[in-house]
Image (cartoon, rainbow, N blue to C red):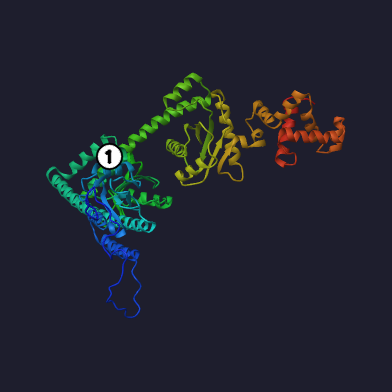
Amino acid sequence: MTGSRAHSPYHRCSDREGGLPRGGGRHPTTVRRGPRPPASTPADHALRKLTVLSRALFDTPDEGEILSLAMDHIAAAGPYSAEAGYLKVDGDLVPSPRNGQIHALAVDRRVRELAGQDGPVTVPGRPWGRALGLRGLERLHGYLVVTSCSRPTEAEHSLLATLVRHTAAALSVAHAHRRRREDALELHRLRKEHTALQRQLISVVAELGYQRAVHALMADVAASGGGEEAITRALHRLTGLPALVEDRFGRLRSWAGPSRPDPYPEPDPVRQDEMLHAVAREAGPVRIKDRLITLIRPHGEILGVLALVDALDEADEHTVLALEHAATSLALELAHLRNLAAVELRLHRELVDDLLAGTDEASAYARSEAVGHDLHRSHYIVVVQWSNRTVDDSFAQTVSRAASAVGMRSLLTRRSDHVVLVADGRPHVRALYEALTRETGTRSGTIGVSAPCDSLDDIPHHYQEAQRALEVRRHSRERYGTTFFDELGLYRILGPGNDYRELETFVQEWLGQLIDYDSRHHAAMVETLTRYFDCGGNYDETAESLAIHRSTLRYRLQRIRDISGNDLANVEDRLNLQVATRVWRIVLGGPG
């Protein structure tokens, strides 16, 4: 095997190679003349050699040559021999041509077993051996297999580690330079290929007619089912310019090509409307700053914007033609998607309309499964009203998109002045409202949410709850936002449209625990609370009306606080409890 010193498998390590004879001594004729300079230690000599080697390693551009240099000069770090070297190429360890054949298979197998880690290596005749990984910051560059005729000292260990680190660093630099050269060559090749492809396309266009070729290409892309992303990519390939699709509100839907902004700029609703009107007034694509823009508008309705980013003003008539054909294909694609959405919305609407009116459970479950919705879960009824939007199919689809964007699984229908969702989970307090604010560009909206509904038969009643929550919000000081029915408190039983069951629900919520306690223990906690409120909170009058001692009354009131969890000192709790006791006694026929 070839290393820093040639040796056979039976090479013996001498105790001393070169230098003065053992014991030293001076020549008898030597005459000292003045003070001698300090003697150079072996460590100093080794460091100088390593410094020279390090310069050579970093001056060498080829990774194979760097490995060979390290193997040839391993003795600069101590009594070492380089048994083998490996470079990692395309994920595999490739042996150095300088590796010998003796012990090659055993060493090679051991190095691969280490799987990137350092480890001992056994070589006959060499009492010490290690496989040392040549590691850069991001990858393993290879291995250096080193043996020694004696166990290295700590200083020799340190020198060897320094040599290995310098070799790995030099390999990292060489690897980076090589990758840079390869990237530059690849970029040059791609540019040449792109130029050749452009020339080839121009040649084809000259023969067959550019317009017919572009039309056929866009038709094929549209027929492939790839959607707007496939059309955007095709437009980018045709023109060589970044292509993009935005919805009518200026939000990015698709981008093909380099230099995509990240994050994409948030649209300004006023400027977006001005841009749409400016482009709509022209017959073809319009240049606005560095973009060539055309509208996607089947049947006159604007569904979005298709644009090319042309910062260097390179667009010609062929670019404009490609943009127009792409816009036509995209208009057909978006119109098709819109029709599918309309059909899905119609099926949802019919099902929700029946649920709100009351329908057969078996039929409702079967129809909900057909549209991919699980009605067996607990649901909430959500009512959405936006003051500046007409409640048509377009607004219903806007609400549907916003609900999907915040993770709400729902069925949807619309009424004359609001949209109704049957959602399979409690909506987040602000998420749907904020999503609709972004979609509509205005905050002038109100959302009412019902209490949870566990039965399809209860959906009509919970629909009324959602409407009640919306009405309370609309007539409050902060009329825009989201209100939950189960957080209304006393407002739940005020106003028109409330029935006996709602009164029962209110009383149960505030007095239910006390009523149950009275029933189980034959107590009179609810009656005590009622008399307390009737007497205006006066302890003496209340105790006298109940024919009990004042301390007994104080005990009962404390037990009422403990059982119900409500605080009589809290203004809102006190009001709700007082109303509940009145309803319990007068409307529901409680004792007294």
* Along the line of sight, the residue nearer the viewer: 428 or 576: 428
Residue 93 x, y percent position in the rendering: 26, 45
- The relative height of residue 404 versus residue 313 in the rendered view (above or below) is above
Location of residue 103 by image quarter: top left
- Residue sitting at x 19%, y 44%: 211
Residue 44 x, y percent position in the rendering: 34, 66
Q: Which residue is mark 1?
A: 329
Residue 57 x, y percent position in the rendering: 27, 60
- Residue sitting at x 34%, y 80%: 34
* Along the line of sight, the residue nearer the viewer: 554 or 432: 554
Say whether residue 344 is left or right of residue 520. left
Instruction: Check disc 1 and give the amino acid type.
Output: Ser
- The relative height of residue 529 versus residue 158 in the rendered view (above or below) is above
Say whether residue 28 is left or right of residue 153. left
* Along the line of sight, the residue nearer the viewer: 414 or 563: 563
Residue 549 x, y percent position in the rendering: 87, 33
